[in-house]
Amino acid sequence: MGLVERKTELQEIDTREKIVRAAMKVFASHGLFRAPLSLVAKEAGVSKALIFWYFGSRDELVKEVIKRALPTDVVKACLEKNLGGRELLKCTGEKYFEKYSDPVMRMLLIHTMAARGLIDYVDEAFEELCTEYLAKIAERVWGSRDKESRIRARMLFGSLLCYALNPPRDIEPKEYVEKIVEVLYKK
């Protein structure tokens, strides 16, 4: 690949990423269904036609935003570090709070949860996260994919979600994660 082709490819990646970031911001404030693509185009500084050039349809853009809104990337990143036990729980909690300390990401997560039952992709993504990935956490942390271990993994995500949506004023994220790990890791 020549220098000109490589530069063009990088520009296309930049443009695509600029559109996704604009869509995330607009969808966070207007919702996944009500946000007009004209606002996304304006925020990205591109034409509406260019959005369709990169994504083919509104649904494909929404799908990309939803993919980024869910904490699947958090779990994958921690699993890829080959952590287990307390360290895996701690990594997951810290990365979760890091991601959802951003108000845009927090609102996108809320909008994505509200889209359950309305968009097949959302249901599939939640199924993958809450079944496959949480089972992997259970196996790495407690050495089993049995029902109790999977419930513990779900408890982790439930408590992280609750904190992200409504953080208590008297508990810092680091302290919260440490306490969750302490409680969940008991055998």
Image: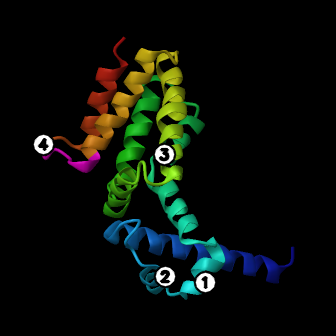
Q: Secondary structure at mark 2?
A: helix
Sequence-wise, which precedes: disc 3 or disc 2? 2
Q: Tell me what residue is drawn at x 59 percent, y 38 percent.
A: 80
Residue for badge 3: 123
Calculate the distance from the C-alpha at mark 3 to the C-alpha at mark 1. 28 Å
Between disc 4 and disc 1, the foreground one is 1
Residue for badge 2: 44
Between disc 3 and disc 1, the foreground one is 3
Sequence-wise, which precedes: disc 4 or disc 3? 3
Between disc 3 and disc 2, the foreground one is 3
Sequence-wise, which precedes: disc 3 or disc 1? 1
Contact check, label 4 and label 3, Cβ < 8 Å: no
Sequence-wise, which precedes: disc 2 or disc 4? 2
The kind of residue on which mark 2 rests is Ala
Above-or-below relation of 145 to 51: above
Quadrant in which the N terminus is drawn: bottom right
Calculate the distance from the C-alpha at mark 3 to the C-alpha at mark 2. 28 Å
Sequence-wise, which precedes: disc 1 or disc 2? 2
Residue 170: which numbered mark, if any? 4
Calculate the distance from the C-alpha at mark 1 to the C-alpha at mark 2. 10 Å
Calculate the distance from the C-alpha at mark 4 to the C-alpha at mark 3. 35 Å
Q: Which residues are magenta?
A: 164-169
Residue 50: which numbered mark, if any? 1
